[in-house]
Image (cartoon, grey):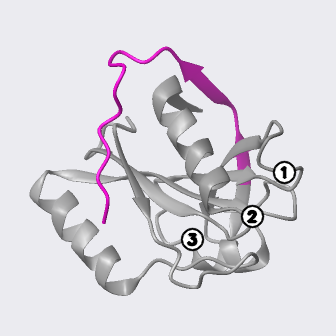
Amino acid sequence: MLTIDQATHDAIVAHARRDHPDEACGVVAGPAGSDRPERFVPMLNAARSPTFYEFDSSDLLALYKDMDARDEEPVVIYHSHTATEAYPSRTDIGLAQEPDAHYVLVSTRDGIDRPVEFRSFRIVDSDVTEEEVSVVPSHDPAVETQEL
């Protein structure tokens, strides 16, 4: 199960709406081994595409160095689908390289002013398992955000 605070959930949804019609992508980092998503890091979709996302390689390298320095890991890796349901595509499954991460997908296919689908999956060795999402009240009204 993914447990995520309301502010982080809302920040992911806002990013998906802001980048629509292109796919949005990012990471929520947390203390290594904790399974706690704490630091929201929206990333630039280097593909700038409505059907595909990719992290900019230099931004991704900088993020991993920063997480290493903070003793963090990617707890959530998220992206949006702009025309399809919030379910991993074959490409998404092939790109999933973090077996301990929660892969969150947000679908904005019904438009940015409508409710979105927000789903989480575990993807290990190309095996996709959907998991429950529990959105809990935020302990801090401000989400720590890092722009890369």
Image disc number at residue 88? 2
Labelled pair 3, 2 in contact (Cβ < 8 Å): yes
Residue 59 vertical placement versus 25 (above, below): below
Image disc number at residue 143? none
The residue segment tinted magenta is 129-148
Number of the front mark, 1 or 2: 1
Name the N-terminal-most of marks 3 and 1.
Answer: 3
Q: What quarter of the picture does the C terminus occupy?
A: bottom left
Q: Categorize mark 3 by other alpha carbons within 10 Å: few (<14), some (14-19), many (20+).
A: some
Number of the front mark, 3 or 1: 1
- Image coordinates of residue 120 in percent, x first then y, are 66, 45
Residue 3 vertical placement versus 76 (above, below): above
Q: What quarter of the picture does the N terminus occupy?
A: top right
Residue 134 vertical placement versus 114 (above, below): above
Where disc 2 sits, the SS reads loop
Image disc number at residue 111? 1
Is 4 situated left or right of 127 in this image? Answer: left
- Image coordinates of residue 76 in percent, x first then y, are 48, 50
Of 54 and 111, which appears nearest the observer? Answer: 111
Name which residue lies at 89% across and 50% down.
110
Circle 3: residue type: Ala
Circle 2: residue type: Pro
Q: Is residue 15 visible?
A: yes
Residue 69 vertical placement versus 30 (above, below): below
Work out which residue is located at the far left of the displayed protein and give it: 69
Which SS does the magenta portion mostly show?
loop
Which residue corresponds to mark 3?
96
Of 114 and 118, which appears nearest the observer? Answer: 114
Residue at mark 1 to residue at mark 2: CA–CA distance? 19 Å
Residue at mark 3 to residue at mark 1: CA–CA distance? 26 Å
Name which residue lies at 72% across and 59% down.
128
- Image coordinates of residue 10 in percent, x first then y, are 56, 34
